[in-house]
Image (cartoon, rainbow, N blue to C red):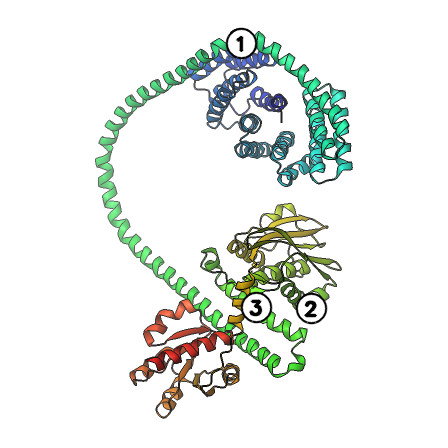
Amino acid sequence: MPQIRIFLLLFFGLNCYDSSAISSSKCNEDPKIDKLVKKALLNFREANFEKSLVISRNALNAATAIKDYCLISRSYNIIAANFNELSDIDKAIFFYKKALYYADKTNNDSLKCNLYNNLGNMYCFEKKQFDIGIRYYKKSVAYSLKINDLKEVYFTNVNIAWAYFDIKNYKQGYLFLKYVNSTKKKYSDGSTEVIVDMLNGIYASSQNDDKAANAYFLSAIESGKRCQEKTDLSNAYLEYSKFLNKINKHREAYDALVNHYNLLEELYNVRKLKKASLAGVSLELDEYKRQIDKVEGEKVEQSQSLRKSKIIVILFVLISLILLILIITLVKNIRYKKKHNLELLEAKEIAEEASLLKTQFISTISHELRTPLYGVVGITNMLLEEHKEISRSQHLSSLKFSARYLLSLVNDILQINKIEENKIVLENLTFNISDEITVIKNSLSFLSQKNNNRISIDIDPEIPEYLIGDKLRLAQILMNLVSNALKFTKDGQVEIIVNLSKVEGKLYYLDFLIKDNGVGIAVVDQSKIFEKFVQVGRKDEDYQGTGLGLSIVKRLLGLFGSTITLDSDLGKGTSFSFTIAFEHDLAKTKSIIDEIEVDLTSSEIYKILVVEDNLINQLVTKKIIEKNNYTCKVVDDGYEALKILENEEFDLILMDINMPLINGFETTKRIRLLGIETPIVALTAFDKDEITDEAISSGMNDIIIKPFEPVKLFKIINFLINEKNAV
C-alpha cells in the first residue's frame, strides 16, 4: 500500500492519544506542564512542526525534572509523531518506544493503547515488518478492551485487517474484518467508511465473489468523494483498478488507475509544499535528538549519584542490623528446621504413595481393559475366518474395527503423557483411503441413526489407490471428529471431504474436512475445546464422553506434523480441517503387502505350551496357534506349567504374567532354575514399558502385548525356535 495512507492511521492513533493525554484521571499531572503538552499537540495538528518540537522539548525537560512519567511519555509521543510527519521513520520509532517505556511505568492504559497502535502503524506500513506490527496492534486491542474503549478496538481491528490483507493472508484478516463489519454502525464515525468498504472489496475479490467486490469498491469510491478524503479515495481507486484488471476489464482498470495517480499527484504536491516549508527545521533535528539524549543522560547520572549516597547509608544500617538478625534467625531456623523436616518427610511419603497408587491404578486398568479386548478381537477373527459366508458382513467388520479402535483409544487415554512427550512413533502401513473412511462410516452407523443423521463421503478421485502411513492413527482422528459431529447434530448431515491439495515428490498432501450442520460452538468456547477433559455447553442429559476426544486429535495431528483448524457458528454448524502428507510408492507398497501376507506356516510341527488363566483367552490363543498347524497344550497356572515340563518338552512357551497362585515372572525363574532353555515369550495385557526389565531379569526371551496380530506372534515364534535350534 502507498505510504500516504499512514497519515490516516496516525490520525486514529492521535485521536486515541488525545483522549488519553487530556483525560489524566490516572496520573497526577502538573497543570503547567500539561498545558505545554496540549499546546505542542495543537501546533502539531496545525502543521507547525518546528514549534511543536520546541514546546514538546520544554515539556519533556520539565516533566523529567519532576519525574512525571505520564507527561514524559506524552511528550515523547508528540515528538515521535512530528518525526513521522517529517518522514524520519527510524527516529519516530525510537521516540515511540521511549514513550512506551515511560507509559509502562504508569497505570494509564489509554496512553499504552495509543502507543502500541502507533508502533503497529510504523512497523506494518512503513517498515513492512508485519509480524512485529500486528503484535503491537493486538496489544493495543488488549488495552482498549481493558479500559472498555470499544471504539478504539474497532479502529485497531481495521488496521489489523488491512495489514493481513497487505500480506495476502485473507483468511486471518477476515476474522478482524468480520468484527469490523458487525460493529460498523455502532462505532464508525464516517472516517473509516471508505477503508472498510475497500477492505470488504479486497476480501470479496480474494474469494472470487466479483459481484460483491465490485459493489464494495464502488461504495468506497462514492464515500471518498462525499467526504473529500483524497488519501482514502486514492487507495480505493488503486485497489479497484487491481480488481478490474483481475476480471479482465482492462479499460476500466486503466481509468481507475488514472484517477488514483491524479489524486496521488495532488497529495504529493501538498506534501512537497509541506516539506519545502520545513527545510530549515530538518537541519536542527539531529541536534534536537542529541539534546533529548543529554536530558536522559543527566537524569541517569543524577540517579546514580543519589543511589550511591543512599547505598552508603543503607549499608551502615544493614551492617548494624545483620548481626542481630543473624542471631535471631539462627535460633528460629534451628526450631523451624526440626519442625519443617518432619513435615517434608510426611509430604514426601504422601506424594510417593499417591504416585505409586496412580501408577498401580493405570497399570491395573490397562490390564483389565486389554484382557477382554483380546477376547473380542480374537473371537471376531475366528468368526470371520471359520464362517466365510459371513466374512463380508459389515457388522462383523465394524465390530473388529471398533474393537481395535477402542484398544487404540484406551492406549492413548492411559498414555496421553506419552503422546505429549513424543514417545509414540507412527507406523508405516499401506492402505486405501476410501476403504478406511467407508469402514469408519459403517462403524458409526448406529450413532448416525440415533440422531437421524446422514454421513456423506466425498473423496478426490486424484488421490492414489494405495498410500503409506499410520492408518490407525488417522482412523482415530477421523473417528473422534465424525462421532463428535454426529453427537452434536440432529436430523442433519455430516460430511467427510478429502481433497488432494499438492504433491511433492512421493508425498501426497491430503486436505481433510469434517463438516456438520449441528448446534455449533460459541466463540468464547472455541479456544478451550482442545484442552483435556473439557466439554463446553454440556448438560447432564446431553452428550456423553470423557472430554478427551479433541485433545487426543490435536496431539495425534502433532505427530503427523499437522494442526487442526476450527470454523463454527452457533446454530449453523462446525467444520474441522487439517492436512496430512502420506507417501505414495508402488514398490514400497508391494513390499509392505508382501511382508503382511508372507506365509508363516512351517513344514515343522512345533509344540507350544500356553500358560494362561483366562478361559476365553485360552480359547483364542489356542485357535490362533493350531490354525498354523502347531500343536498346543494349555495349563491354567504356573504350578501346572512346572509340573508338565517335568515330563514333556516344548519348542516354545507362551507365558501370561498376571496369574493366581504364582505369576509369570516367578514361574519363568523356576523354569530356568530347572535348566530348561525353551524360549519363553510373555503374552500379557500389561504395558510393555512396565514389565520389560523384570521380564528380561526373570529369563524371558520376548514380550507380546494382547491383543496382537497373529502374524507378529508367528514371526517371533519362528525366530526364537530357529535361533535356539541353530545353537
Contact between marks 2 and 3 (CB within 8 A): the answer is no
Residue 402 placed where, x, y %?
60, 69
Q: Amino acid at mark 2?
A: Phe
Q: Is residue 307 above or below residue 330?
A: above
For label 2, the crowd category at 10 Å Cα-Cα, with few meaning under 14, some 14 to 19 and many 20 or more, is few
Q: Is residue 201 above or below residue 639?
A: above
Residue displayed at 46% across by 58% down = 417
Label 3 sits on what residue type?
Leu
Compared to residue 165, the image places residue 616 above or below, namely below
Mark carried by residue 446: 2
Q: Crowdedness of circle 1 by 10 Å Cα count: few (<14), some, many (20+)?
A: some
| x and y, in percent, of residue 208 in the image | 72, 40
Q: Quadrant of residue 229?
A: top right
Percent x, y of residue 445? 69, 67
Which residue: 53% across, 84% down? 627
Front residue of 679 and 354: 679
Residue designated by label 3: 406
The N terminus appears in which quarter of the rendering? top right
Left or right: where 553 falls relative to 249: left
- Which labelled disc corresponds to residue 50? 1
| Up-down relation of residue 230 to residue 50 (above or below) | below
User: The residue tagged with tag 1: helix, strand or loop?
Assistant: helix
Alpha carbons under labels 2 and 3: distance apart:
16 Å
Circle 3 crowding by C-alpha within 10 Å: few under 14, some 14–19, many from 20:
some
Element carrying mark 2: helix
Q: How far, Cα to Cα, is label 2 from label 1? A: 78 Å
